[in-house]
Image (cartoon, rainbow, N blue to C red):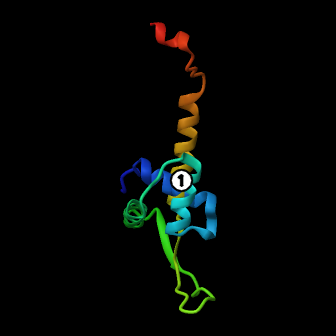
């Protein structure tokens, strides 16, 4: 049984869920940066994708070569059913944990 993804891997999976068929290394990195305001290196994104592929959370596929001269195919990624189920579970768990939490200054007076 694969271990649960770490925080960066979770961000990669959520970015992929947001991007759909347009998910490849660069777009995943841009989506994470746009949503989190964090700069994540391409090396970190590709390392996370490699781990997620080994854990069978993502499946790679190759696009057609781009229409420009010398255009290359891109390695895109799809979420697997297992990844979608894990994301649903994690989202539900996180939402349950946050229910009723306030972070007011009065909470710090304990």
Residue at x-position 52% and y-position 44%:
90
Percent x, y of residue 4: 40, 50
Q: Quadrant of residue 95?
A: top right
Q: Is residue 106 above or below residue 90?
A: above
Residue marked by disc 1: 33
45 vs 36, left or right, is left
Numbered label tally? 1
Quadrant of the snapshot with the C terminus: top left
Percent x, y of residue 33: 53, 53
**How would you rate the neighbour count of disc 1 (Cα within 10 Å): few for under 14, some for 14-19, many for 20 or more?**
some
Q: Residue 12 or 5: which is nearer the viewer?
A: 12
Q: Residue 97 or 62: which is nearer the viewer?
A: 62
Q: Is residue 57 above or below residue 99?
A: below
Percent x, y of residue 32: 53, 54
Name the outermost residue toward the top.
Answer: 110
Q: Secondary structure at mark 1?
A: helix
Residue at x-position 43% and y-position 61%:
45
Percent x, y of residue 51: 37, 62
Residue at x-position 37% and y-position 56%:
2
Residue at x-position 38% and y-position 59%:
44
Quadrant of the snapshot with the N terminus: bottom left
Q: Is residue 41 above or below residue 105?
A: below
């Amino acid at each position: 049984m694969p271990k649960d993804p770490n925080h960066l891997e979770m961000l990669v999976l959520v970015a992929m869920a947001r991007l759909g068929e347009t998910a490849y290394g660069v777009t995943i990195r841009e989506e994470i940066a746009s949503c989190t305001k964090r700069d994540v290196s391409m090396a970190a994104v590709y390392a996370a994708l490699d781990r997620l592929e080994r854990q069978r959370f993502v499946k790679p596929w190759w696009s057609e070569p781009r229409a420009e001269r010398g255009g290359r195919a891109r390695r895109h990624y799809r979420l697997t059913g297992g990844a979608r189920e894990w994301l649903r579970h994690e989202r539900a768990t996180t939402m349950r944990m946050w229910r009723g939490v306030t972070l007011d200054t009065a909470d710090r007076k304990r």
